[in-house]
Image: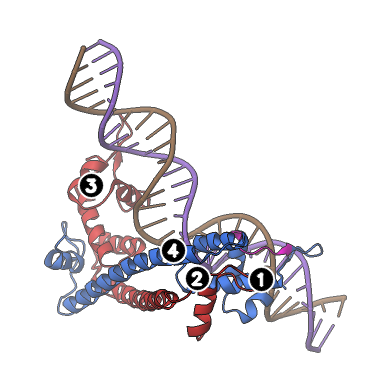
Chain colours: A red, B blue, C brown, D purple
DNA sequence: CTACACCTGTGTCTTGGACACAGGTCAAGC
DNA sequence: GCTTGACCTGTGTCCAAGACACAGGTGTAG
């Protein structure tokens, strides 16, 4: 299979497949005639797995570890559980950060609605930004 | 001021200051004697502004534009308003994505609690991951 | 004068692909 | 057979926003 054929039914892009190939998750063989990378059914299977894992928040590096573990014939499940727990913590952190940022942004937009535009002065670049953090910033 | 002194009262790191310097947002002068970068009060002022803007979700590139506009003596306020509106949209998107991911992760962890560890088979790398997306994946 | 803690600039690394680019492939038309 | 044009390919580079490593400089306590 060529990369475009491999990509077809899976929901992903050629660039993504090339990236996974580059980091060694997929192992196509190089065609003698045209240099194209030829993917087999095992690659197709691995790609499907990779995409599933990515959708669950595993990093590409995580997936590499999992695949390596599984390649030894051992259960990757305990590893998978541990990693996901860690990734969930991180996602929780990102979530809280994003939530807080979103609130700050909305709050700023609301607050700015009644404020005029001003030219910068020697000690004020944009009074909207500088005024906002002065009023609601506690750190 | 040396970089560590500049950083001291602001809540940031030397690496961050060096980065802003690298991209041209800060303009210290190079000391003749030891090659150290020497920051002035204007840099301190700019840094404070940059950190405020970053906390509101502006990208470093955005801030560069804003600073450039303000350097011409013109109001940066309209630009600031437009950019923040756009960044809010993006943040909203990230927020939704993170929210959905968090739910998937928690759901997976919960679902896996009753499932055993299994060794990989020829067509199954990790039944937890592959089983999860099969059961709850709609795309 | 020396030991040692801390500070410095420069250069590289990170994530997960996206994008640009020059060239190759393939089917349609002449 | 040959050519045109659409699409496809691999390789290389680029992105954000710093973090980290490293070799060397500085300053101070003894």
Q: Which mark is residue A122?
A: 1
Position above or below: B38 against A19? below
In 3D space, how far apart are the residues under numbered discs 1 and 2 (Cα atoms)? 21 Å
Residue B111: x and y in percent read 16, 76
Q: Respond whether the residues carrying marks 1 and 4 are from the same subunit.
A: no
In 3D space, how far apart are the residues under numbered discs 4 and 3 (Cα atoms)? 36 Å
Mark 2 — residue? B54
Residue A86: x and y in percent read 34, 76
Q: Are marks 4 and 3 in contact (CB under 8 Å)?
A: no
Q: Respond whether the residues carrying marks 4 and 2 are from the same subunit.
A: yes
How many numbered markers are drawn? 4
Q: Chain of mark 1?
A: A
Q: Chain of mark 4?
A: B
* Residue under the image location 62 percent in, 65 percent down: B18
User: What's the magenta region?
Assistant: B22-29
Q: Is residue A104 magenta?
A: no
Nearest-to-viewer mark from 4 and 2 = 4
Q: Which mark is residue B69?
A: none
Left or right position of B36 against A14: right
Residue B25: x and y in percent read 60, 62
Q: Chain of mark 2?
A: B
Q: Are marks 4 and 2 in contact (CB under 8 Å)?
A: no
In 3D space, how far apart are the residues under numbered discs 3 and 1 (Cα atoms)? 56 Å
Left or right position of C24 against B107: right
Nearest-to-viewer mark from 4 and 3 = 4
Front residue (pair A44, B46): B46
Q: Which mark is residue A7?
A: 3
In 3D space, how far apart are the residues under numbered discs 1 and 4 (Cα atoms)? 23 Å
Front residue (pair A51, B12): B12
Mark 4 — residue? B83
Left or right position of C8 against B101: right
Question: Around disc 4, counting alpha carbons within 10 Å, would you say few (fewer than 14), some (14 to 19), or many (20 or more)?
Answer: some
């Amino acid at each position: 299979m060529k990369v475009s054929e491999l990509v077809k039914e899976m929901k992903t892009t050629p660039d993504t497949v090339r990236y996974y190939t580059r980091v060694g998750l997929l192992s196509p063989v190089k065609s003698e005639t045209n240099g194209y990378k030829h993917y087999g059914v095992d690659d197709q299977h691995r790609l499907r797995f990779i995409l599933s894992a990515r959708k669950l928040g595993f990093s590409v590096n995580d997936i590499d570890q999992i695949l390596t573990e599984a390649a030894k014939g051992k259960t990757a499940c305990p590893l998978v559980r541990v990693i996901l727990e860690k990734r969930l913590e991180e996602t929780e952190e990102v979530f809280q950060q994003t939530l807080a940022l979103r609130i700050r942004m909305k709050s700023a937009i609301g607050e700015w609605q009644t404020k005029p535009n001003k030219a910068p002065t020697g000690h004020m670049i944009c009074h909207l930004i500088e005024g906002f953090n002065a009023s609601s910033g506690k750190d």
